Amino acid sequence: PIPANGMLADTAAALAKTSLIVSDKARVDFSTNLQFRSASMSSGTVFNLNGKTVTVKSMTAGGANVAPGVYTAGSSLFTAGYLIDTSTGGTLIVRGSGTTILIR
């Protein structure tokens, strides 16, 4: 599960600055609410939200950018097989990069 438990385990706050890359048909089970800078999932990989809320700034799934939004059971990432929730209430939030305005 992420985050790992025990000695020398990363704290949830430390993970907020990381990028999570999942490949090779891996499955990631979340054990607490977490934030990541970004997430990248190859085809055939799965996040089990396990009733938790996972928040990312940006995300790709199967090589395609995931639009900012809130993804819960029945949404596109669930129906495409990238997300499952073995508990209830699991949510993935993709915040997006925000808007940059350049004035010259």
Image (cartoon, helix red, strand yellow):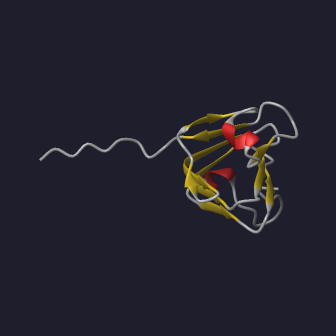
Q: Is residue 64 left or right of residue 26?
A: left
Q: Residue 63's x, y, as percent?
A: 59, 59
Please report the residue visible at 75 percent of the width from the left and 32 percent of the height from the top: 74
- Position of residue 79 relative to residue 18, above or below, is above
Question: Which quadrant is home to the N terminus?
Answer: bottom right
Q: 97 or 8: nearer the eye?
A: 97
Please report the residue visible at 76 percent of the width from the left and 33 percent of the height from the top: 73
Q: 63 or 21: nearer the eye?
A: 63
Q: Residue 10's x, y, as percent?
A: 70, 60
Q: Residue 86's x, y, as percent?
A: 88, 40
Q: 16 or 78: nearer the eye?
A: 78
Looking at this rendering, what residue extends furthest in the right direction? Answer: 86
- Position of residue 7 relative to residue 91, above or below, is below
| Displayed quadrant of residue 32 | top right
Count of picture labels? 0
Q: Is residue 36 left or right of residue 104?
A: right
Looking at this rendering, what residue extends furthest in the left direction? Answer: 104
- Position of residue 67 relative to residue 4, above or below, is above
Please report the residue visible at 79 percent of the width from the left and 64 percent of the height from the top: 25
Q: Residue 21's x, y, as percent?
A: 65, 63
| Displayed quadrant of residue 27 | bottom right
